Amino acid sequence: MTTVYVVLGALLAANLAAFIVFGVDKKLAKTPGARRVRERTLMLYAACFGGIGALTGMRVFHHKTSKPLFNIGVPVLIVAEAAAAYGIYRLFTH
């Protein structure tokens, strides 16, 4: 049972980090001359099991919602992450 809590904690941390990075980048986007977070970095946060946090950040902060890379890519990553999580679960429980 402890392993479940560790995995859930890691997922929570990854999603929270993605959410925060999207919020920080939105704030930087409003600041003239500020150095922004690369789109590649934002997608990396989403790809490292932070897809739900990234999608939530996109919606809450209204950030990157008009870009197809994010509008399509992040939901696709969420589905891929869910499939990977299910595969890992099946691997270790059977």
Image (spheres, helix red, strand yellow):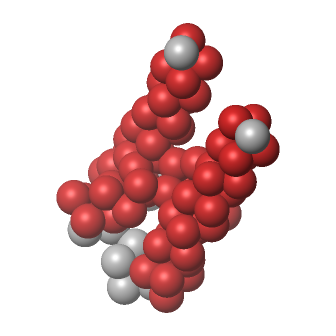
Residue 94: % across, % down: 75, 40
Judge whether 63 appears above or below 65 on screen: above
**16 left or right of 80 in image:** left
Judge whether 84 appears above or below 2 on screen: below
Residue 84 appears in the figure = yes
Residue 69: % across, % down: 55, 81
Please report the residue visible at 33 percent of the width from the left and 49 percent of the height from the top: 23
Dividing the picture into quadrants, the one containing residue 2 is top right
Residue 50: % across, % down: 52, 49
Residue 38 appears in the figure = no
Please report the residue visible at 53 percent of the width from the left and 15 percent of the height from the top: 1
Judge whether 6 appears above or below 28 on screen: above
**26 left or right of 9 in image:** left
Asked whether 65 or 92 is in front, the reply is: 92
Number of numbered discs overlaid on the protein picture:
0
Please report the residue visible at 41 percent of the width from the left and 55 percent of the height from the top: 52
**9 left or right of 30 in image:** right
Please report the residue visible at 45 percent of the width from the left and 42 percent of the height from the top: 15
Judge whether 88 appears above or below 12 on screen: below
Residue 16: % across, % down: 41, 37
